Image: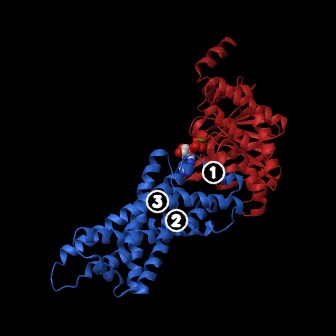
Amino acid sequence: MKLFFHIGRYFLMIKYTFTKFTKWNVLKKLIVQEIDDLIIGSIWIVAFMSFLVGGVVAIQTALNIESPFLPGNLIGFATRQSVILEFAPTLISIIMAGKVGSFITSSIGTMRVTEQIDALEVMGVNSFNYLIFPKIISLMLYPFLITLAMFLGILGGYVASVYAGFSTSFDFIQGIQLDFKVFHVIYAYIKTTLFAFILATIPSYHGFFMKGGALEVGKASNISFVWTSIVIIIINFVVTQLLLA
Amino acid sequence: MIKVEEISKSFDGIEILKEISTVFDKGKTNLIIGQSGSGKTVLMKCLLGLLEVDRGNIYFDNEKFDKENISAVANLRKEVGTVFQGSALFDSMTVLENIIFPMKMFSNTTDEEMLIRAQEVINRVDLKDADNKYPSEISGGMKKRVAIARAIVLNPKYLFCDEPNSGLDPKTAIIIDKLIQEITIEYNITTIINTHDMNSVMEIGDKIIFLVQGEKVWEGNNKQILKTNNKLVNDFVYSSELLRKVGKLGG
Ligand SMILES: Nc1ncnc2c1ncn2[C@@H]1O[C@H](COP(=O)(O)OP(=O)(O)O)[C@@H](O)[C@H]1O
Ligand SMILES: [Mg+2]
């Protein structure tokens, strides 16, 4: 089975990533660079997407529950739940699989086809640690991005429903505070952290082990996006089953 | 000196290298020649330990290359410089950072000493006004110079160059060949060069091994190569129209 081969090689890659460390003062600079590329470079798209999606969630909830018997704070409540539990962690991570994931695959893949990885190896550098470890560490800041997404998603919902007249500001804010469970937030951050690890490692795997030339780099980015998304969805399902069901 | 004993290498059941044995001499430019696809790069990557051989032994100055002996491999790595076919410069670093990189990773010298050493090799390879440029901003010939500078910055005992003049115009190609040869003699390095270029063969072929489909079919130097009766060598040598004419003139 080809799949088992890939899974085995993926875990070996993870193992090598955490052995034979690069000098700390070199690694430090790489981590800063990755934070800039992967986290800072994603702030705008995350902010934009989550604000609008939050707005859409609120409006759709409002349209579906236009019944005088339902309490006015329901829109705020439903928006908060959807954004924190699903839209911010999962949907944004799928988008990041496209943005950050294909960036990682194509940058590592390009280094592979232009023999830059071979160059590292013959110098005696552990290329797994040198290239992948800084990405994993910088993506440990990913929960901050998702926090931003949660905040802006709810804000988007607020703006959309209040300004479009689906809810009053008072009702919406009351809805946000209604029946707040800390465990839901913990659940969301557990997912987010797992997704961050997936976002760093699966695209790295596809870049690292690709063969061919420039055309194949494009194909590898494509396949990497598909697999990263699939794994995120599967993990989402499993974690939800384990923690919420 | 690097000695190779009957090394073989297969990919997916197809034998790419077939029991190759030879010796690459110190202080000489040793050439591995052959057509595209004959196995030159695979042979070089086996010597570099980037690919694992299926059978056979490799000795670096009588010390057997043993993949299992991690510390020996690590020490050997520091004595090897490599110039890859496309130069393999790190795109994200400037020329100067590329050259300093091996020192930064493996020596405990100060930043100042690193800069001095970098300047030495930059002067040695005659690289002008490129320090702060990125690889994408310099010409192919310059890239090779940077790659050579990076390869020699830690004073290697062994230098590997995979088609160092591919993609260069003939004039630049000869300059780069000559540069590698001078450095080899100057620092008494064991240099191995892959090439399919007859100009290089004639200019710097101190020692030549000729591969056909992964098999070593001839070995000699640039004086012997024009005189041999080996049909395969003759086909390769005289596939260049110019040399065929010169060959005929010379009788
Ligand atoms: N990693 C690999 N997997 C499978 N086949 C390979 C691999 N690397 C090289 N080959 C095959 O080995 C043969 C020799 O290739 P190579 O050493 O690159 O030739 P060249 O003499 O042009 O450098 C080619 O047929 C190539 O397709
Ligand atoms: Mg080659």
Determine if residue A66 is in view.
Answer: yes
Give the residue pinned by disc 1.
A118
Hey, which quadrant is residue B52 in on the image? bottom right
- Dot 2 amino acid type: Thr
Hey, which quadrant is residue A15 in on the image? bottom right
Query: Could you classify mark 2 by the number of other residues whose Cα lies within 10 Å: few (under 14), some (14-19), or many (20 or more)?
Result: many
- Residue A30 x %, y %: 62, 58
Q: Please tell me in which quarter of the rendered image ligand 1 is found.
A: top right
- Dot 3 amino acid type: Ser
Give the residue pinned by disc 3.
A42
- Residue A3 x %, y %: 45, 67
Query: Could you classify mark 1 by the number of other residues whose Cα lies within 10 Å: few (under 14), some (14-19), or many (20 or more)?
Result: many
| B82 on left or right of A52 | right
Q: Quadrant of the N terminus of chain B?
A: top right
Q: Which chain is red?
A: B
Q: Nearer the viewer, mark 2 or mark 1?
A: 2
User: In front here: A152 or B110?
Assistant: A152
| B136 on left or right of B113 | left
